[in-house]
Amino acid sequence: GVLFFANNRGILEFDGIFWRNIDILGKAVYSLEVDQTGTVFVGAENEIGYLIADESGGLQYRSLLPYLDEKYWNFGEVWFTCNTSDGIYFQTASYIFRWNTDTIETWYSEQGFHTSFNVNGKFYVKEKSKGLCTITSDSLLLISGGDEFAGPSIMGMIPYGKNNILVITRNNEFYILAVNIKNENISSVRQFTEMDNF
């Protein structure tokens, strides 16, 4: 029943009556995510972490930077934070970090990342000039048919039916990704020409 808002001065918390500002070390916050235990994870400017209750029950910020090698600390804005069964993902322009209880894993892209999405509990990311990728067995891999998205910017991904994903690009194109649950292969099915025209 509590609302949280990413804000240029931290996080705004609203319980229906009172507003409260939670300071995130003076940083602007760009993304928030809640895991299955109710913990709020935070993606900010050169900051990743989570909120934890203090002795009085108020929420305070706890940084995850001590778990991250210092050479990665200048990663910029965290545009997307995502909860999956593999852990919590934080996506920046050049890095993906995954927090899994007590460790942080890191993936880097020289070309950079554009957008990422959580669809049915799975993390997907558009790597510029490469295409649509996901992380499988701790490796960042281009999905089957993902190179079709090397050029167009992906603006949305949502579940579509039981085993499909609807993808919308900046070029006003709509795709259906048919997901094979058994081997996680994805085949792109181009459809919706009339919708494109509209």
Image: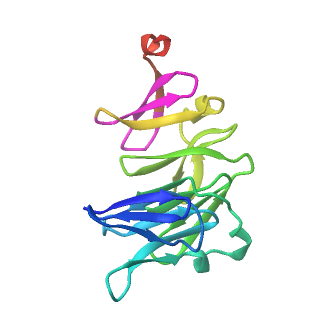
Q: Which residues are magenta?
A: 162-186
Q: Is residue 182 or residue 8 the one in the foreground? A: 8
Task: Examine the structure image and report whether residue 149 is included in the region drawn in magenta.
Answer: no
Tell me: 151 left or right of 197: right
Q: Residue at x 53, y 62 (%)?
A: 43
Name the image quarter holding the N terminus: bottom left
- In the image, is residue 127 above or below residue 91? above
Asked if residue 168 is among those painted magenta in the image, a careful observer would answer yes
Q: Position of residue 175 (x, y in %)?
A: 46, 25
Q: Nearer the viewer, residue 129 or 72?
A: 72
Which sits in the foreground, 14 or 84?
Answer: 14
Residue 114 is situated, as x and y percent measured from the top left of the image, at 62, 43
Q: How is the image coloured?
A: rainbow
Q: Residue at x 51, y 71 (%)?
A: 49
Q: Residue at x 67, y 38 (%)?
A: 130
Whether residue 125 appears in this view of the structure is no
Q: Quadrant of residue 194?
A: top left
In the picture, the quarter occupied by the C terminus is: top left
Which residue shows up at 73% across the image and 45% down it? 111
Do we see residue 153 in this rendering? yes
Is the residue 110 above or below the residue 153 in the image? below
- Residue 193 placement, left or right of 129: left
164 or 91, nearer to the observer: 91
Q: Picture coordinates of residue 57 (x, y %)? A: 32, 82
